[in-house]
Amino acid sequence: MLSEQDVATYRRDGVIVVPDVLDAATVGEMRRVVAELVAGAAQVSEHNDVYDLEPSHTQAMPRVRRIKAPHKVHGLFDEIVRGQPVIDILTKLIGPGLRLHGSKLNIKAAQYGSPVEWHQDWAFYPHTNDDILAIGVLLDDTDLSNGPMLVTPGTHTGPVWNHHGEDGRFCGLIDPEIIRSEIDRAIPCMGTAGSMSFHHVRALHGSALNTSNRSRNLLLYEVAASDAWPLMGVKDFDEFNSRLLAGPPVVTPRLADVPVRMPLPPASRLGSIYETQLGATKSYFGRAA
């Protein structure tokens, strides 16, 4: 499923798309679960531990922009990331020791799916080394019309840009004026449903508002080498080890010479990336009403 050329491309660009990792039946089941979860948002009126809601959400017309930690919400999402096809790809890109850092399901519904401003995941959760990536599982056929994730090749080996706002607090996005040339070089992660993108934790990326008549749902997993330890600390060692996908527990973090900016002081609007980014005064993409 992953050739040596694919691995070389990932090393060079910091991003690849692998087609058809999941079959149609699995994608269909995932869509069914997502539809049930979105319908369940009719019972809530504000963000909670499961739902991050669109600004236009009402209980009469539930609109969800993110399912938080879907691997904890439904067993199917945990099975996907632990499945052998995914583990085989991760082993080639990261190595034999693997740990799930987290997951989320970004729901870009037709006509109003919220954008995500330009950022590097590394700014949110720096580790002792950067053998970390995010998997993007395409739950819908994705092209330029329905707000694909955009990634700038090569930025995974460059600087860590400032993700702080004018008030000095972390805001989870980069002032677009200072990365204009990088934005111009970004490429879309497109493909058929069941395909997966893999982008390095330091790769610059973002995505626009979905103005099409089609949804663009993207299931994201963040996966780290098992010897990459979060610099913000480990609060529960047993829970930390429960997220191992491959390999034994590790108590000797590997230290690498990588650039780091801590996400401190914390965002003025704590919550998902959508809430965090609202604390910034500058943005690139049009925002949902």
Image: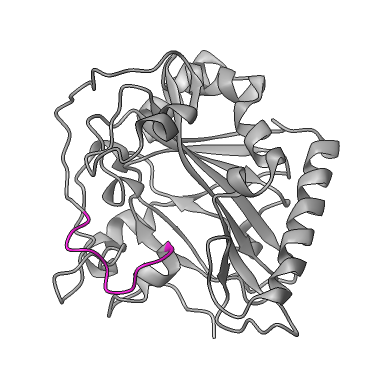
The quarter of the picture where residue 111 lies is bottom right
Taking the spot 67% from the left edge, 84% from the top edge, the residue there is 58
Q: Residue 92: horizontal and vertical position, in percent? A: 48, 17
Q: Residue 14: horizontal and vertical position, in percent? A: 39, 35
The quarter of the picture where residue 273 lies is bottom left
Q: Is residue 224 above or below residue 183?
A: above
Q: Is residue 270 magenta?
A: yes
Q: Residue 126: horizontal and vertical position, in percent? A: 26, 42
In the image, is 27 to the left or to the right of 126?
right
- In front: 288, or 212? 288
Taking the spot 47% from the left edge, 78% from the top edge, the residue there is 286
In the image, is 262 to the left or to the right of 134?
left
- Quadrant for the C terminus in the image: bottom right
Q: Is residue 135 magenta?
A: no
Number of numbered tags placed on the structure image = 0
Which residues are drawn in magenta?
A: 263-272
- In front: 27, or 243? 243
Taking the spot 60% from the left edge, 70% from the top edge, the residue there is 113
Q: Main secondary structure of the magenta part?
A: loop
- Quadrant for the N terminus in the image: top right
Q: Residue 258: horizontal and vertical position, in percent? A: 17, 34
Taking the spot 19% from the left edge, 69% from the top edge, the residue there is 169
Q: Is residue 7 above or below residue 236?
A: above
Indicate how the structure is coloured in the image.
one colour
- In front: 93, or 275? 275
